[in-house]
Every structure is written in C-alpha cells, then in structure tokens.
C-alpha cells in the first residue's frame, strides 16, 4: 500500500545557521511521521522561505497536515494547495 512521502527544502539563505536548519527539518520529519497515517498517498514538499520560531512552525505544520488530511477525505487529489512557511 503506498504511503505519503515528504520532501524538505530549508535553504541557507532562509535559515543561515546549520543547527537551526537541522532542527527545523527534524521537527517537520517528526510531525510528518505522526501524521502519516491520516494522509493519503501523496508526495508533499515543505519549503521554508524565511526564519521561523518553533511555535510558528508547529502552528503552520498543524494547518498544513490538517488541510491535506481534509482534502484526502474529500477525495480531491487534484488540489494544488500551497502553504508558504
């Protein structure tokens, strides 16, 4: 059975410090692992375009995964919704 997959883009220009980029990617991957069972077999790409604190990151991820899960339940695989973080 196919499952959802995730791709991460956290560039050096957006988040200059390597430890901050790694922390952001770790948080996104962890949240994705916990939400994967609620997602359809989709390929998701999360792109961070600027500095973000943990609280804002968690809020944005919650909205993103909730929106994707809602679209999957509605059966709308053609939705091309983008969330910018």
Image (cartoon, rainbow, N blue to C red):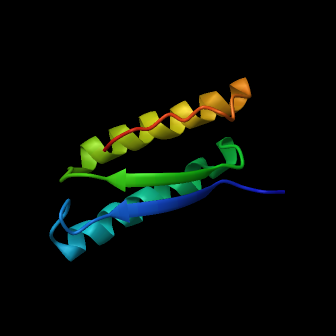
Report the residue at 63% width, 29% height from top: 71
Give the residue at x 18% y 53%.
Answer: 51
Residue 12 shown left or right of residue 79 in the figure: left
Q: Nearer the viewer, residue 44 or 56?
A: 44
User: Dividing the picture into quarters, in which one does residue 13 lie?
Assistant: bottom left
Question: If the image is split into quadrants, where does the N terminus sit?
Answer: bottom right
Seen as rendered, the residue at the extreme bottom is: 18
Q: Is residue 28 above or below residue 62?
A: below
Residue farthest to the right? 1
- In this picture, residue 33 sits left or right of residue 72: left
Vertical placement of residue 14 versus 19, above or below: above
Indicate whether 17 appears above or below 44. below
Q: How many numbered markers are drawn?
A: 0
Residue depicted at x 71% and y 49%: 41
Q: Is residue 31 left or right of residue 85?
A: right
Q: Looking at the picture, how far across and down is residue 21, in whole percent?
A: 27, 67
Q: Quadrant of the C terminus?
A: top left
Q: Position of residue 48 (x, y in %)?
A: 31, 53
On the image, the x and y values in percent for residue 66 come to 53, 33
What's the residue at 19%, 63% (across, down)? 15
Q: Residue furthest top?
A: 74
Residue 26 coordinates in the image, percent (x, y) = 40, 66
| Residue situated in front as seen by the camera: 73 or 10 | 10
């Amino acid at each position: 059975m196919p499952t959802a997959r995730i791709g991460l883009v956290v560039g050096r220009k957006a988040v200059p410090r390597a430890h901050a980029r790694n922390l952001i990617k770790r948080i996104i991957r962890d949240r994705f692992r916990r939400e994967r069972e609620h997602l359809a077999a989709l390929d998701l790409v999360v792109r961070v375009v600027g500095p973000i604190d943990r609280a804002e990151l968690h809020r944005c991820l919650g909205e993103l995964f909730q929106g994707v899960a809602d679209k999957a339940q509605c059966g709308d695989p053609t939705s091309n919704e983008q969330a910018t973080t």
